Every structure is written in structure tokens, then in C-alpha cells.
Amino acid sequence: MNCTDLDIAFDHGISAINTDVGFWAAVGTLAIASFTVLCFGQRVARPLAGVLAFVGATLGLFWLMDSVACEVRIVVSLVAGVMAATVALCLLKGGMFILGGAAFGTVVHFTYEAIDFPHKPPFEIMGRSGVYFLTVGAASVIGAVTSVCFKKHFMRITTSLIGGGGIALVLYLCSNRNNWDLASVVYLSVLIASALMGMFIQRCLSSRSRAEARRNDSRNDAHHAV
């Protein structure tokens, strides 16, 4: 078996993204995926996480193992993709506290990076302000606790943050492509505003689903009573 054709197709796909058509197609796909997660995160989070983990692990490992025999590359990449998808699905089912800590910590990280603190930090760890590690650590703990105590609401918040982050990334890619000079706080504002919108939309959709379920139950009870 020869992987040359697969390597060429992979390289062509990467090169196509650098073209105008490929770039806007990739950005459009990212925008649609981000908006879908933003609005319907509670419903699509698990299958989407599984698909992304499988595709990302498979393609990434296949690309990194370019010096290995073709059969080995394919088998190992597919096995790694299945394992990554399994881990992602298990985390969303039983390891929400890990995702909670990571989500809250990531948001605080970007917030800290977007704000320019002029004063010298009281102490440093590995060349970075100790306040950074304290705030990110505290946020991670809060996120872990929140994910355990409020699973449904946490999934709504997390998927909204992920969708908002995707929209902020779309803005960054567009600004970088067109040489727009946007401050970091702009991307942070877009992320927060999009996340708040996503939480509101998901709450409305959830309330609507519960209302429809109650109406269906009432119709069934009335039918059985007759």
C-alpha cells in the first residue's frame, strides 16, 4: 500500500486553505459550526465532540507519522481517532469536572491576556505573574465545582463559551487576513457577547421543548381519559 496519494491530497487540502476560496470556505464552515454549538450546544455537544476528536486525532497523527510505513500510519491513526472519540464522549458523560475546570480557566486566561496590567506583579512564577496562576487556578476550581453541581446549566454555559470562542476566532482570522488592527479586548468582548446570546437562545429552546412536552402529555392524558 502506498500513502503518497493520501499525502498529496492532504497537502493540497492545506494549500487550498491559503487561497481566497479555500480560506473563506474554511472560515464559513467554522462560523456555521460555532453558531450551531452556540445555539444547540446541549443537543449536539456529545456527537460533535466525538466527531471532532476522531477527525483531529486521525488526521494529526497521520500527518506526524510521515516516516512510518503506510499500513502502520493508517491503522495507528484510526485507532488513535477511535480512542480520542471515546475519551471525549466519556469526559462529556462522567468527567464534566475536567471540562469545567478547563473551560473556566481558559476564559480567565484570555481575559488576563486581553487586559494590560501596568503594575509589576507582587511575585512571579516561571516568568509570569503569580496573580495569573492564582486567578486561573481559582477559576478552574470554580468551573469544576459548577460542572458537578449544575450539570445542565454548565453544559449550556460551556457550549456557549465554545461557540463564542469560535466566533471570536472567525473575527480574528478575518482581521488577520485583511490586516485589520483590532485590540485584544475586542475579541474578548465578542466572545462574551456571543456566549451570553448563546445561553439565552439555549434557555429559550429548552423552555420551548419543556412546554411542548407538557402539552403532549396533556393531550395523551385527555385521550386516555376519553
Image: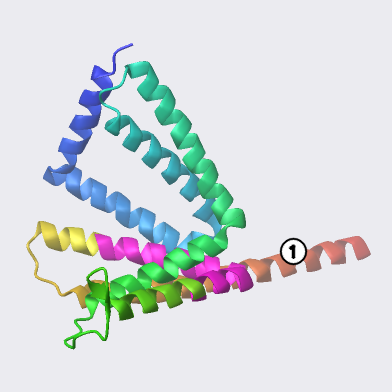
Residue 134 picture quarter:
bottom left
Residue that appears at 61% across and 69% down: 148
- Residue 126 is inside the magenta segment: no
Residue 47 rendering spot, x and y as whole percentages? 52, 47
- Residue 160 is inside the magenta segment: yes
Q: Along the line of sight, which residue is nearer the eye, 144 or 3?
A: 144
Residue 146 picture quarter:
bottom right
The outermost residue toward the right is: 225
Residue 210 rendering spot, x and y as whole percentages? 66, 69
The residue carrying mark 1 is 216
Position of 154 relative to 1 (above/below): below
Q: Is residue 39 left or right of residue 226?
A: left
The outermost residue toward the bottom is: 119
Residue 44 visible in the displayed image: no
Residue 49 rendering spot, x and y as whole percentages? 47, 50
Residue that appears at 13% across and 72% down: 182
The outermost residue toward the top is: 1
Residue type marked 1: Asn
Residue that appears at 48% across and 70% down: 157
Q: Along the line of sight, which residue is nearer the eye, 214 or 89?
A: 89
The region drawn magenta spans 142-169
